[in-house]
Amino acid sequence: MMETQYHDIEIQYYIAGRSATFASSMPVAGNLFHHAVEMLLKFLLIKSSYSDDQLKNKFGHDLNKLWIAVKSTLKDPALDKLDELISGLNDFEDLRYPGKGYMVSISVYKCKLPEVANKYAGAKQYQTCLEDIDEFVSKILTGRVNPEWLKNRMMGDAVE
């Protein structure tokens, strides 16, 4: 089933993004989180009757466009408070082609990330927060995915 494939890949990207964060692989972690959220949003849209071709042609890798469609499908006004997180993660797509330079900050806990004043002139700043991403994934998956389904895809210590 196509939705299961999207969800399997989303979970793998999410776990890899968390691991990369704790390994201080910041550009990679941000890009992995972008992919995880992209696949999660596409998973939700596939479940609501979008085709694979529609997802590819209409949305590509644009999290903002996907997010608008998901919010329209789920009809939950409380999701609006997650707009800033999605917009910030959408910027990480640029890191596929880093160009001039970049400065990445991923905090583990919620906090106001400091601006880097003139330290890297001309470098684009990418910022996000692991705790916010965790809360987002939990909020979106709760009630939509059977925890046993997820547990059956894990092995060894990951199950505990």
Image: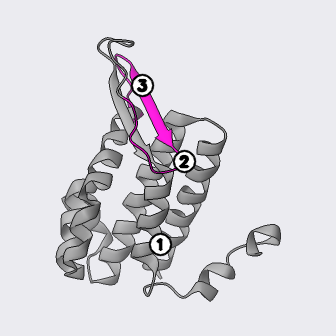
**Predominant secondary structure, magenta span:** loop
The disc label shown at residue 103, or none: 3
Choose mark 2 or mark 1, whichever is in front: 2
Quarter containing the C terminus: bottom right
Q: Which of the marked residues, 2 or 3, is nearer the chain's N terminus?
A: 3
Residue occupied by mark 2: 108
| Residue for point 35% across, 76% down | 44
Residue name at image x 31 percent, y 45 percent: 88
Magenta segment: 96-114
Per the image, the residue denoted by label 1 is 138
Element type at mark 2: loop
Q: Is residue 118 above or below residue 83?
A: above
Seen as rendered, the residue at the extreme front is 111
Percent coordinates x, y for residue 135 in the rendering? 45, 65
**Which amino acid type is marked by label 2?**
Val
- The amino acid marked with disc number 3 is Met
